[in-house]
Image (cartoon, rainbow, N blue to C red):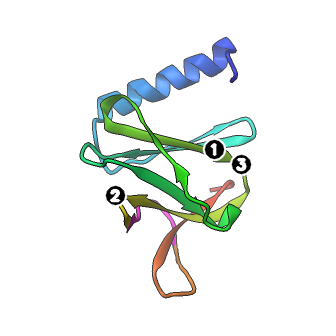
């Protein structure tokens, strides 16, 4: 874990912003060196998983934090599609970019240059 003052201040700032937002439809992504942290807000969820094309849709468990904000951190990739599984249901956040998958459903698209 990175304990540098700059990293800790960035994490603190992110949690302050998320706390002020409350549970809204804004789902930030934060780059932390060679990893990405995704945030999802859901007060009622019992479990949330993050799945992406970067690792053949392996389900990464998210951790619930303050203000009902769930977080998952995955290795940094330049581009991939992703979605969440919230209490067993495939769920898309309010992401800025989506693409159709091979089954005709939408997935969020993460592109590092966007």
Distance from the alpha carbon under mark 1 to that under mark 2 = 23 Å
Residue at 34% across / 57% down in the picture? 87
- Residue 97 is a magenta residue: yes
Residue 92 visible? The answer is yes
- Of the residues under marks 1 and 2, which one precedes in the sequence? 1
Q: Which quarter of the figure has residue 77?
A: bottom right
Residue 19 % position (x, y):
33, 28
Q: Nearer the viewer, residue 53 or 22?
A: 53
Q: Is residue 98 left or right of residue 4?
A: left
Q: Nearer the viewer, residue 45 or 24?
A: 45
User: Which residue is label 1 attached to?
Assistant: 36
- Of the residues under marks 3 and 2, which one precedes in the sequence? 3
Q: Is residue 11 above or below residue 53?
A: above
Q: Nearer the viewer, mark 3 or mark 2?
A: 2
Label 1 SS:
strand
Q: Is residue 65 left or right of residue 8?
A: left
Q: Nearer the viewer, residue 33 or 43?
A: 43
User: Which residue is label 3 attached to?
Assistant: 76
The answer to whether mark 1 and mark 3 are in CB contact below 8 A is yes
Residue at 73% across / 35% down in the picture? 33
Residue 69 % position (x, y):
37, 38
Q: Nearer the viewer, residue 5 or 103?
A: 103
Label 3 SS:
loop
User: Which residue is label 2 attached to?
Assistant: 87
Residue at 43% across / 48% down in the picture? 27
Q: Is residue 101 left or right of residue 23?
A: right
Label 2 packing within 10 angstroms: few (<14), some (14-19), many (20+): few
């Amino acid at each position: 874990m990175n304990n540098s003052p700059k990293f800790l201040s960035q994490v603190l700032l992110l949690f302050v912003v998320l706390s002020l937002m409350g549970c809204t439809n804004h789902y930030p992504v934060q780059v932390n060196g060679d990893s990405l942290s995704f945030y999802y807000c859901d007060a009622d969820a019992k479990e949330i998983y993050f799945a992406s094309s970067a690792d053949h849709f392996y389900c990464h468990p998210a951790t619930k934090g303050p203000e009902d904000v769930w977080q998952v951190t995955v290795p940094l990739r330049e581009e991939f599609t992703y979605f969440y599984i919230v209490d067993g249901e495939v769920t898309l956040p309010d992401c800025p970019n989506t693409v159709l998958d091979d089954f005709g459903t939408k997935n969020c698209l993460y592109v590092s240059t966007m």
